[in-house]
Image: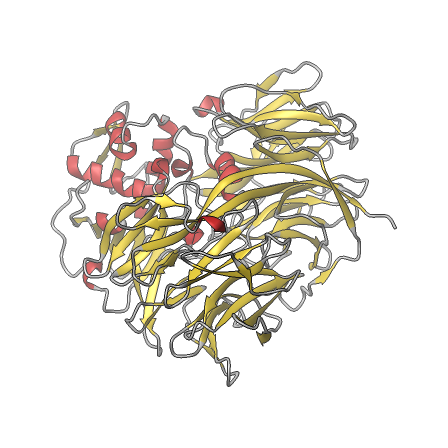
Amino acid sequence: MDTAPFSMGRYLVFPGLNRIQAGDRVVTIEPKMMRALVCLAEHAPNPVTKDELRVFIWGGYEVSESVLKHLIWDLRKCLGDKARTPEFIETVPRVGYRLIAVPGEPSPPGPESSDQAESPTVEHTGPRASDSKIRFKWQAPLFLAVAVLLVWWWRPAPAPSPSQEVAPNPVRYAVTPFTSSPGLEIDPAFSPDGKRIAFAWRPNMHAEYDLYLRDLASSEPVRMTRAPGDDLAPAWSPDGRMIAFIRAGAGAEETGLFMYELATGDISRVDTGDRHLIQSVDWSPDGESLVFAFQVEGRFHLGLWNRTKGDIQLPVAPSERGLGDRDPIFSPEGDRLAFLRTWSPWSGDLFLYHVSTRELTRLTFDHAGIVGLTWDSDGGLVFSSDRTPPRALWRVDPDRASVQWLPVPAKHPHKPDAHDAGGFVFQEVSCDPNIMSLNLADGVLTQDPSNLASTRLEYHPRYDGKGVGLAFISDRTGATEIWLQATANGTPRRVTHLHGPFIASFSWSPSDSEIVFDTHEDGRAALRIVSTEAGEIRSLHADNHLVVAPFWASNGWIYFGSNRSGDWQIWRKHPETDELEPVTTQGGFRCVEGVRDGRLYFHKRDDRGIWSMPLAGGPASCVVADLDPVNGMDWIPGHEGIYYVRDRGRRGLELAFHEFSKTQVTRTYPIFMLSPYPGLSLSPDGSRILIGRVEAYQSDLILARRATD
C-alpha cells in the first residue's frame, strides 16, 4: 500500500499514520479504513468493485458483503460524509464504491513534522464490527472468547462519587462448579423455575459456539443448536417455553436474533429489519416484548420488539459521546430497564430507564469495564466490573445508587445471571500465562529462563537496572506475590509475603535495592515499597482514590496513575519527603521513563497513542499514534524507539518498533495469544524483550448460593 500523504477535499490524508486531518482536527482511523480509502484514492474517480476492495483490504480472505458495507459506513462517519448526498464516497449500484474527491498533493506542514510541537487535537475511532472477525463472527464471540478471557483488571475507574460509598456486602456466598468441560462455556442463563441453565459452549478454538441446556440435577448437557456460526446469549421466555438467542453466522441472513422452541426444537429468525448486528437480548416479564442492543455505524442502540405487532421501538436515545447502549435487562416488575452505557470499548456505566416516565437515572460513575448485569432477588443489580483490580462481582441498589462489593470466592467472574431463590450463576475465566523471551535479532520466542514457568500465573516481568536480576509476579503460593531470581540461573525467591492483596504491577528503584508496587483489596488500592533483600514492607500511599502502575524514576520520584483529581492523570510522590504533585493535566494512566533521554512516556486510559514530556515537566506531544488503550500496558521505550503491541486483525497481534529518528514503525515481530496480565520488559542491553503469552485458557460456569451458618 502506498503510504505517501495526499489531499482530498478539505482533508489531508496520512496513510502511514492512519490519520486524516482537517485544519486543527486530526482523526486517527482504523488501518482497514485507511486501506479502503487508499484503494479508492488510487482508482479515483473511477469506481472500485467490492471484490477489488475485499482483496486490497483483507488480502484475499473471504469476508461477507455486510462486513465491507459496515467498514464503508464507519469511514464515511469519520469523514462526515453521507451515503445519500455524498461529498467523498459514492455508492455505485451493483458495482462498488468510488471516491468523488480526486486526491492531490498535500500542502505542508503535516503531522509528520509536528513531533517537536504540541500535537493538535486528536480523535480516534474505536474497534468496529467490521474489524472483529473476518468471517462475520462480529464482536460478541470475539470479545467473549478473547477479550473477556484476557481479563482487563487493568481498567480500574475513577473513584465512586460521594453518594457511592463502597462497602462489602454482609451476605456470604458459597460457590460450586457447574461445568468443567474443556473449552469456553459462557453466557449462562437460569430457566424461570431455576431448575435448568442454558449456556453457550465452544469445546475448542476451532469449533463454533452452540447452545446447550443442562438440569441442575444432571451432569450431562443437551445440545440445542448446531448451525454454522456462533450461537450466543440465550434468554428464557417468562413461561419457559422459548429461548431467544443471538446467531453470528457467515452472512446477514444467518446473523441476528433467533428463537428456539424447547418443545419441538424449531428455530425461527426474528425480523429485526436491517438491525442484524445484535449484542444482547432480554424478555419483558409479560413475554410480549424483546429488548435487544444492536449496532449501526459503530454505535449501540436499544430496540424493543413487540411480538404481536412485530414493530420495533427505540426506547432510549444513546448519548452523543461514547459507543452507545448495550446489555439491556428488564426489572422483574417490567417497570424499569437497566443497561450499560459504554464510553469506550472497555469502559462504561450502568443506567436505569423508567418505562412509564421515560426518565433516565445514572447508577454508577466508574467508567469501568463492566461485563454482564442481572437483577437479584432483592431488587438490586449484580454486575461484573474491574472498577478496582482484580475483576469482581458488585451490587448496586437502584433506589440509592449505592455500590457494594460482593464477597464471592471466585477468580475473574463474568456475566452473572441471578435467580429469585437468592443465588446466581456466572462464568469464571482461567488461563495459564507464562513469561517468554523474545530475541529481537531473530524474532524467536523461548521460555528463558525456563524455571519461571508453572501451572499458576506468572506476569509483569521486570529486569533490574544491571540486567542480572529479574522480578515478576506469581500466585504459585496461592496469592499474588513478587518473586526475584537471577536471570542466568537459580531458583525464584519470594520477596513479599502479603498472603492476600492482589498485586497488579511494580517498578525497581534506581538503586535496585527496593521495589514499589500497587496492591488492591476489597475495592481499595495502595502503594507499598519492599526491600529486595530484607523483605521489609512500608506503606507509601493509601487514600480513598485509586492508584495504578507505579514507576520509580531516576530523579527519585515515584510516578503513578491516579483518579484523585476526578479523572485519570499521572501523579508523582517522593518516597522520603512524602510530597505529592500532579504531573499531567490532559490525561494519563501509566508512565515509563525513557532510556537515557530524560523524558517521561505515558499513555491515556481511553485515548489512542503514547505521549512524551520532559521528566521535569513541560508540554506533552504524541509520539506513537496507533497504540490501542486495550494494549495500553504492553509497551516499553527502547534506546532508539518504542516497542508496543498492536492488533493486525486477521494476522493477529504483533510487536511493533516505532523508531524515533524515522517517526514510523520499522520492525515488527508476530506474537500469538498475548497474556491478559500485562507488561513488557526490555533487557538493559536492548537485545531481548520479556513478554507474557497464554499457554492455555478456558471458561467454566460457577454456581453461587448464599452461605448458611
Extreme residue toward the bottom, this view = 577
Asked if residue 272 lies left or right of residue 692, the reply is right
Quarter of the image where one finds residue 292: top right
Residue 614 can be seen, yes or no: yes
Extreme residue toward the top, this view = 264
Which is more toward the observer, 469 or 232?
A: 469
Extreme residue toward the right, this view = 709
Asked if residue 162 lies left or right of residue 623, the reply is right
Q: Quadrant where the N terminus lies?
A: top left
Q: Is residue 559 above or below residue 681?
A: below
Q: Is residue 168 above or below residue 176?
A: below
Quarter of the image where one finds residue 540: bottom right
Which is more toward the observer, 650 or 563?
A: 650
What is the number of callouts on the image?
A: 0
Q: How is the image coloured?
A: secondary structure
Which is more toward the observer, 193 or 223?
A: 223
x and y percent of residue 521 in the render? Answer: 64, 62
Tell me what residue is drawn at x 11 percent, y 50 percent: 105
x and y percent of residue 94 in the render? Answer: 28, 22
Asked if residue 39 lies left or right of residue 511, the reply is left
x and y percent of residue 331 in the render? Answer: 71, 43
Residue 358 can be seen, yes or no: no
x and y percent of residue 676 in the render? Answer: 49, 48
Tell me what residue is drawn at x 79 percent, y 40 percent: 420
Extreme residue toward the left, this view = 105
